[in-house]
Image (tube, rainbow, N blue to C red):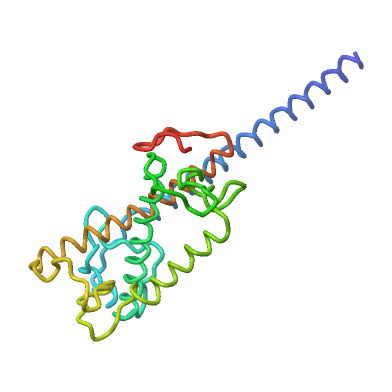
């Protein structure tokens, strides 16, 4: 009888422990679900459209009609660079940087996909007889065992610097019409023959192409690097990166 009572006591104690553990696990799972739900609500709130109040800041009202504010995003400033007391000079500086980076990205994107399509400059890159198509594509062309020699990279850097200090800048007093206008009184290509609506359309096209090119060249660089991790995607237009 004593053994039976002792055994029953152990069973009761074990059952109580199991019941307590079950309750604890249930509470823990409930707390985790609540935490995940709260995180999802916070994430949704972060991406939800902001409520339109009766009063907006002066800076936002001033820039919501600028070139580049268009559907579907409208006025898109996720980093808040135009929050607070921002004047036109600050906006023009940001727009200048955006346009310039977009132009560089467009050249970089073309310079990345054209060699991958088999289009190279004719002839040799140096007096040693190395042809342009003998070097790898992408990042490997400037970094790695088969990269272009430093003398060639140095010439490219010097050429870019020459363009920066001579042509790729806005010279005051030369009749430039907008931020990023680098005609400087001697390059036209028929721009003055366009009406105002056509000029705005072409500027918007350049701005959007630059934005797309910045995302495009970044995507190509990322995909090229993740190949080292064993992922070889079949990309549109250019296929597998080589």
Instruction: State whether residue 89 is above or below residue 102.
Output: below
Residue drawn at the location 21% of the way across and 64% of the way down: 203
Residue 235, quarter of the rendered image: top left
Residue 232: percent from the left, percent from the top? 50, 34
Residue 192, quarter of the rendered image: bottom left
Q: Can residue 45 be seen in this view?
A: no
Say which of 134 and 206 sits in front.
Answer: 134
Q: Is residue 113 left or right of residue 125?
A: left
Residue farthest to the bottom? 173
Residue 61, quarter of the rendered image: bottom left
Q: In this view, does 70 lie to the left or right of 41?
A: left
Q: Is residue 88 visible?
A: yes
Say which of 10 and 146 sits in front.
Answer: 146
Instruction: State whether residue 222 is above or below residue 70.
Output: above
Say which of 87 and 50 sits in front.
Answer: 87
Residue drawn at the location 64% of the way across and 34% of the way down: 25
Q: Is residue 147 left or right of residue 62?
A: right
């Amino acid at each position: 009888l004593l053994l039976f009572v002792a055994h029953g006591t152990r069973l009761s104690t074990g059952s109580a422990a199991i019941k307590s553990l079950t309750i604890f696990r249930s509470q823990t799972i409930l707390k985790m679900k609540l935490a995940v739900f709260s995180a999802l609500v916070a994430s949704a709130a972060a991406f939800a459209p902001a409520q339109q109040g009766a009063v907006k800041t002066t800076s936002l009202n001033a820039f919501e009609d600028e070139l580049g504010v268009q559907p579907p995003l409208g006025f898109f400033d996720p980093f808040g660079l135009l929050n607070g007391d921002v004047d036109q000079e600050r906006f023009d500086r940001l727009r200048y940087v955006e346009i310039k980076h977009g132009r560089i990205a467009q050249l970089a994107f073309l310079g990345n996909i054209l060699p991958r399509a088999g289009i190279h400059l004719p002839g040799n890159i140096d007096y040693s007889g190395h042809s342009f198509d003998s070097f790898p594509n992408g990042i490997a062309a400037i970094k790695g065992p088969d990269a272009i020699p430093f003398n060639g990279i140095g010439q490219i850097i010097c050429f870019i610097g020459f363009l920066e200090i001579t042509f790729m800048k806005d010279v005051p007093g030369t009749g430039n019409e907008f931020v990023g206008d680098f005609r400087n009184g001697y390059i036209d290509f028929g721009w003055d023959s366009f009406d105002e609506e056509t000029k705005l359309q072409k500027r918007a096209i350049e701005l959007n192409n630059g934005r797309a090119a910045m995302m495009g060249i970044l995507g190509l660089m990322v995909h090229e690097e993740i190949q080292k991790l064993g992922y070889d995607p079949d990309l549109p237009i250019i296929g597998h990166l080589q």
